């Protein structure tokens, strides 16, 4: 690039040969290489900073708190997932004396997909599956986001954030005690 | 060469004009990653931030909106002794996290005053009130929650409950991007 635009020595020679020191015909072109370099450096900088710093967001629609319509779901199509501390995840199916299983954040996707297949086989519609997400107060926010993420990844359309109640707490303590 | 130079500087000007620098953040929040692909709009954001220790901060963009908000707070709480220069400081502040009665102290010394987080006290309901004022100051505002991945869920839940009490059932959780895994 430097050679492209370096006519200075040759033009000065020209000026000498014409014997006109005053109006020596020097080229009006300036060496732009450094400026262009700087320009591209700045472009790179602005391009990288511009695109990298856009935060994404996850839209969450919660049900109305004191609305009179209570959504009822069929137990057969539901699964309850409890987010506990230390990234532990418990899940169970049904209400009456359910079997509580323990897994972790990485293993929950398989569980959801398996349950989805069960529902698919029984009803013919995989998106009837309803996931109830219950987070203990000591669970980390990260777990919640990951859980909501799993909903997006497994394409689960119906899910709800439900309060962690005493029944759940009883089930989990039983599970821990049984081990 | 000249043409390339022209193009370079044209691009440079474009990027310089379109770039918006990240404002200084009052608190450090490490957001969790998700596969969500919705972009957060650039303006009209009311952001509630929850940091690692569970402190809650309230911030709204646009200085004009902040000015309106400040005057609303002043009007509604005559018992808080604001100094005249506080309005300016409030307009320049990105987010704050102190109970309302401590707000003048914070505004007198924005850099050094320790912020212990908004009071989520249900009897005083300061956050609920601030949400109302925020929406009155800018009716087009969107509510976004930006919480640290290591924050305890109960703090976030408290914030969500307050939002729901105010009948705000639709809000955004701010996350960073993660690649969607193959099924």
Image: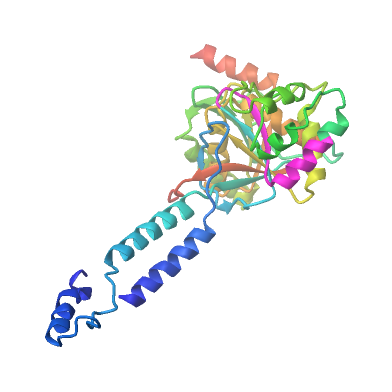
Question: In terms of depth relative to the viewer, which is nearer, B57 or A158?
Answer: B57
The image quarter containing residue A75 is top right
Left or right: B37 with respect to A47?
A: right
Q: Can residue B69 be found in the magenta stretch?
A: yes
Q: How many marks?
A: 0
Percent position of residue A173, x then y: 58, 15
Decide if residue B168 is in sight here: no
Q: Can residue B68 be found in the magenta stretch?
A: yes
The image quarter containing residue A15 is bottom left
Decide if residue B42 is in sight here: yes
Left or right: B44 with respect to A86?
A: right
Percent position of residue B151, x then y: 57, 27
Left or right: B73 with respect to A40?
A: right
Q: Quadrant of the N terminus of chain B?
A: bottom left
Left or right: B115 with respect to A1?
A: right
- Give the magenta-colored segment's residue range: B52-72
Is residue B113 depicted above or below A162 in this figure?
above
Q: Residue at left 64%, top 21%? A: B116
Question: In terms of depth relative to the viewer, which is nearer, A102 or B103?
Answer: B103
Percent position of residue B99, x then y: 73, 23
- Residue closest to the far bottom: A18
- Residue closest to the far top: A177
């Amino acid at each position: 690039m430097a050679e492209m635009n370096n006519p200075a020595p040759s033009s000065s020679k020209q000026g000498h040969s014409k014997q006109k020191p005053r109006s020596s015909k020097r080229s009006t072109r300036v060496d732009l290489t450094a400026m262009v370099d700087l320009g591209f450096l700045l472009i790179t900088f602005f391009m990288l900073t511009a695109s990298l710093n856009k935060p994404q967001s996850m839209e969450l629609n919660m049900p109305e708190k004191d609305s009179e319509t209570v959504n009822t779901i069929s137990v057969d199509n539901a699964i309850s997932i409890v987010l506990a501390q230390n990234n532990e995840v418990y899940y169970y199916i049904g209400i009456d004396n359910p079997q509580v299983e323990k897994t972790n954040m990485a293993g929950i996707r398989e569980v959801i997909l398996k349950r989805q297949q069960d529902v698919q086989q029984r009803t013919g519609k995989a998106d009837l599956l309803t996931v109830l997400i219950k987070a203990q107060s000591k669970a980390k926010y990260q777990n919640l986001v990951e859980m909501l993420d799993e909903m997006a990844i497994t394409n689960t359309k119906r899910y709800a954030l439900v309060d962690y109640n005493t029944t759940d707490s009883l089930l989990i303590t039983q599970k821990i005690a049984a081990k | 060469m000249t043409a390339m130079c022209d193009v370079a500087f044209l691009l440079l000007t474009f990027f310089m004009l379109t770039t918006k620098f990240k404002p200084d953040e009052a608190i450090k929040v490490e957001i969790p990653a998700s596969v969500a692909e919705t972009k957060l709009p650039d303006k009209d954001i009311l952001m509630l931030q929850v940091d690692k220790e569970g402190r809650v901060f309230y911030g709204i963009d646009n200085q004009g909106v902040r000015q309106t908000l400040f005057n609303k707070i002043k009007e509604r709480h005559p018992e808080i002794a604001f100094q005249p220069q506080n309005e300016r400081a409030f307009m320049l502040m990105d987010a704050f996290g102190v109970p309302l009665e401590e707000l003048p102290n914070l505004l007198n010394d924005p850099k050094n005053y320790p912020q212990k987080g908004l009071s989520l006290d249900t009897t005083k309901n300061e956050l609920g009130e601030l949400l109302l004022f925020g929406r009155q100051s800018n009716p087009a505002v969107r509510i976004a929650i930006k919480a640290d991945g290591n924050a305890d869920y109960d703090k976030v839940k408290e914030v969500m409950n307050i939002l729901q009490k105010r009948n705000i059932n639709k809000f955004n959780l701010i996350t960073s991007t993660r690649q969607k895994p193959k099924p």
